[in-house]
Amino acid sequence: MKLYTTVNIQPADLLLSHDRPIMMLGSCFTDEIGLRLIQSGFEVMCNPFGTLYNPLSIAACLNRIMQAIPIGEDCLVFQDGLYHSWFHHGSYSSPNKNQVLTRCNASLEDAVRFLERDPLLLVTLGTAFAFFLNNPSSSLNGQVVSNCHKVHPQQFIRRRISVDEVVQALLPFLGKYQMIMTVSPIRHLADGLHGNQLSKATLLMAVEQLTQHGCDYFPSYEILLDELRDYRYYSRDLCHPSDVAVDIIYERFQQSYMSEQTRLLSIDYQKQYRHSQHRQIHNI
């Protein structure tokens, strides 16, 4: 008796190699997979601007890196005693304006150098809902922001972007870089279950079009929603996948995008990582 539906994934033509760097951009699910790739011995730059949820912010991040556009004071907002960047995660924020600019631009410079090495891009789309700055006095008025930093909602227009907007934002990068895309299985429930499904459907339809232009697709969303399909594979918030679920998804990713030799080498690196994290109880 078969009690679950298997997501059939064919071995990909595009294979990962320890000799080629990987740049990862997207939702917090990107950080989970990125950590496992690092533990497997790959050279990975993960979210140089911090966590990015919607495709337009990911595209804006990549454009800024490609053109080496620095972060200036016009990119900052002061809120709750801290300076924040509209394009960065809150981990870059600080009460010192110059410190924020230094952190953001140092990370940008690292990303520029990394991108010049022609890395594989692994992009995870989290949601089709995006926030656009609604402040006529700002030079960034009308532009998408990566993080609201708890600024008053009246400062933004929030809407679900269209399939065409996603495609047009990401399509230019496919002619320049090899890219693997996935849709995050993390549920965004601010708009309810129905809103989350509409959002994910928008992303899936956009990715389907992008695969016709050379992009690879890995079905992490389908693995959790259809194959695992049980709340025991979620963390306590019932939105994020559990560590076990991420491990299963990563194992399927390895099977699809790594040769047997690369998988064996990854196992060796994982053993070395676990050994490096081992804490001795007694020093003799």
Image (cartoon, rainbow, N blue to C red):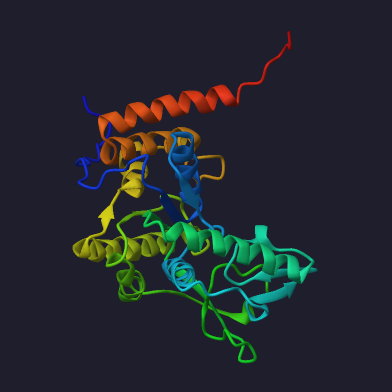
**Which image quadrant is residue 261 in?**
top left
For residue 76, side relative to residue 224 (left or right): right
Residue extending farthest to the bottom is: 136
Residue extending farthest to the top is: 284
Residue 49 percent across, percent down from the top left: 55, 61
Identify the residue at image location x=54%, y=68%. 146
247 vs 5, nearest the viewer: 247
Identify the residue at image location x=68%, y=66%. 102
Residue 238 percent across, percent down from the top left: 51, 44
For residue 263, side relative to residue 91 (left or right): left
137 vs 64, nearest the viewer: 64
For residue 272, side relative to residue 249 (left or right): right
For residue 91, side relative to residue 120 (left or right): right
Q: Against 158, is 128 above or below?
A: above
Q: Against 121, is 259 above or below?
A: above
The quadrant in which the N terminus is found is top left
Q: Against 193, is 219 above or below?
A: above
The quadrant in which the C terminus is found is top right
**Which image quadrant is residue 58 in?**
bottom left
Identify the residue at image location x=68%, y=73%. 151
